[in-house]
Image (spheres, rainbow, N blue to C red):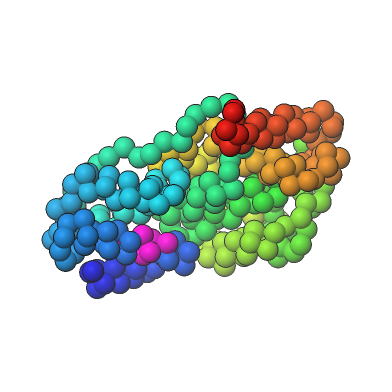
Amino acid sequence: MPQDVIRDWHAHLAHERRRSEHTRRAYVATAERFCAFLMEHRGGGVDAAMLRSLSAGDLRAYLAARRAGGLGNASAARELSAIRTFLRFVGGSNASVPQMRGTRVRKGLPRPVAPDHALDLAHEVEDNARQGWTGARDFALLLLLYGAGLRIGEALSLTGAALPFGETLRVTGKRGKTRIVPILPAVAAAVGRYVEACPWPIAKETPLFLGARGGPLQPGVVRASVRSARRALGLPERTTPHALRHSFATHLLAGGADLRSLQELLGHASLASTQVYTAVDAAHLLDIYRNAHPRA
């Protein structure tokens, strides 16, 4: 196994691409699994020359083996993305990486984004950012949408006065209505990591989430990053920043939250707006029933 190549790649991810520790760990683990598979698949040692000679068939064989072990569609697509990045590094500026179509998640009626898909999406957006600090920013923002159920406009209207994040956050929603939302430790940690990495000063009166040139981050930039990430992961078009808010609501309801509490957390003026999630959750349960019941 080319441990020296993987070690150099890890250093490249850390120092040149400034990827997070989580991303580096996941990418290196994928590269090691891939090289271990190639040793058996090709029946010999793995070196840089062999990695440069791989075909799309080799990638398909690896993904087939991973899928046989229970890997889901989105995770398989994420591994494929990591392998392509690794092979481009090994091949250098003239690298010719095998091309193949990524896996696709079955399309259907609108459904919430699964928890693991929400995290996959946030990590993919972070990995594809041009700069390490903007990747940390986008990861924190998407975690905030999913973890606290914010609208994207609400998140982008936050200022530095919200720092440092504690257990709760005061949010101003539609028509100037304010509400208090709980903040998960993982969300607070992601925001703190972004603030530490941000090259621009974040004052109490300036936006919390800043664009590449230090101005307010525009929602279109976030939506474009999510579009690119969901295509790479094979997620359906309904996987948008706003879908993360819907997922927050649906998963809380499935976990036992009552409608009145959910109404307060989402900032809905009317309970009727919240009741739509009972239908979404019922549809999700029906899917589980149909897939699990032997007579369904």
Question: Does residue 269 sit above or below 91 in this rendering?
Answer: above
**Horizontal placement of 162 versus 90: left or right?**
right
**Horizontal placement of 243 versus 9: left or right?**
right
Q: Is residue 37 in the magenta section?
A: no
Q: Residue 115: image x %, image y %?
A: 59, 48
The reply to whether residue 111 is visible in this rendering is no
Q: Residue 203: image x %, image y %?
A: 67, 61
Residue visible at 70% across and 40% down in the picture: 250
Q: Residue 109: image x %, image y %?
A: 58, 26
Where are the magenta residues, as a range? 26-31
Which sits in the foreground, 137 or 3?
3
Q: Residue 45: image x %, image y %?
A: 16, 66
Residue visible at 84% across and 32% down in the picture: 271
**Horizontal placement of 114 versus 17: left or right?**
right
Which sits in the foreground, 207 or 112?
112
Q: Is residue 28 in the magenta section?
A: yes
